Amino acid sequence: MILALDLGTTSIRALLIGGDGRCLGMAQQEFRQIFPQPGWVSHDADEIWEVTCQVIPRALAHAHRQASEITAIGITNQRETTVLWERASGRPVHAAIVWQCRRTADLCRRYREAGLGDLVAERTGLVIDPYFSATKIVWLLENVPGLRDRAKAGDICFGTIDSYVLFRLTNGAVHATDPTNASRTMCFDIHRLDWDQELLATFGIPAAILPNVLPSAGLFGHTAAGPLPAGIPVTGIAGDQQAALFGQRGVAVGDIKNTYGTGCFTLFQTGDTAIASHQGLLTTVACDPCGQIAYALEGSVFSAGSAVQWLRDGLQIIGSAPESEALARSVEDTGGVYLVPAFTGLGAPYWDSEARGTLVGITRGTERAHLVRATLEAIAYQTADLVTAMRIDAGHEVQALRADGGAAANSFLMQFQADILGVPVIRPRSTETTALGAAMLAGLAAGFWRNPADLA
């Protein structure tokens, strides 16, 4: 079996995947979300590692299987979230800065005003935004005393969450990432497939802190100590959205998927062509049928499932996320209420980090069901913006949208999405396609599956 580690934004999941692609056992545990200031989001990377160590044995127990039966490990992760840690000890030097965090908005403005936008877009396929890792690294180097000198001396490692957990799994033997994660740092040339020295110099990021970039499906290293026996190979790594596209078998040009998670992330497979967007989308690295380099157009919505969490935890008008479906169906429409859930700014295609959430159309007749329905509809409207932009950029019609992620279980949301797009929305039997994609990458590289045809 393959062990898939899904290192998400709010929880860690360990899934054991059998040869037929079915989940044999799973364990999941949430970890803390830290909000130091309005618009700032942090994680404790040490806690992420500790939770990872806890869910692995629980997944094995759930499956009634032994760790010795694990053929290989695949990792998928929340992308862009930035960790700097000590090379010698593996201990983080500061809280991780999460992809949602907007603390580097002023830094981004400075870089845009310096005219770096075109260079960043040309080399990395990205826009200058706090979303990506580069300005998070700069912020840490500027705000943690003595860190820049230690970084230059090679004492500090940078990584996204995949790199950090890989480092800990291998007891510090491997400091690496894959192209899908590297392509989200704003420091990686997606055409040459290497770190961009000009951008690194411009940002003042020492090359000594960067991980090696290895193929998404290939050998990264072997477990050394901790929650697993030594010697199990790690043979697959991909950022969560690229892993979901691969898990949905979105490997042909024109295949498109949307993950309805904390945010919404829509990827449109463009094969071996890196299409430059003119509609406010990103050009990013994806995986081809064998898990090697391909490209995709991507649109990112920052607040999707997190808007439902806000209804539950912030406003406390629902007790659980699944309640939202029945409430939304209990009214014919939103009663004229609309929500723009720009809690941490707007992502694609607008890229407005200063935007904040807006609720309009409230009347004395507005009830909680109207607000709940407006929140679900807002997720679909934001996704429709992305799909429209992709149709224009790619010059290719969308035949169907493949859906996954936690909110894809909401049938009201899925039907409303299909209605406003005018195309079928296809929901797989298991919406755990992110973890499945990581398992597929690892399994291909380890020979657990012989070729891509076995995955179909």
Image (cartoon, helix red, strand yellow):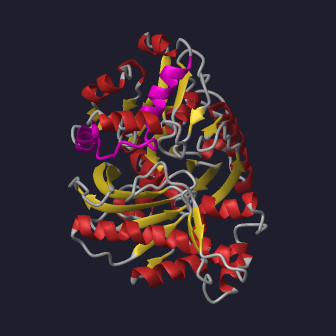
Image-based side of 21 in relation to 253, left or right: right
Q: Would you identify the image quadrant in which residue 197 lies? A: top left
Classify 98 as above or below 419.
Answer: above
Residue at 49 percent across and 28 percent down: it is: 139
**Quadrant including the C terminus:** bottom left
Q: Is residue 120 magenta?
A: yes
- Residue drawn at point x = 56 percent, y = 14 percent: 145
The magenta region covers 116-144
Characterize the magenta stretch by its predominant secondary structure. helix
Viewer-side residue, 65 vs 442: 442
Q: Residue 261, located in which quarter of the rendered image?
A: bottom right
Question: Residue 23 location in percent, x, y?
Answer: 60, 61
Residue 170 visible within the image: yes
Q: Locate residue 186, reporting x and y percent.
A: 36, 38
Q: Position of residue 189 (x, y in %)?
A: 27, 37
Instruction: Give the residue at x 55% y 55%.
Output: 356
Q: Is residue 317 left or right of residue 373?
A: right
Q: Where is residue 301 shown, x and y percent of the image?
A: 48, 59
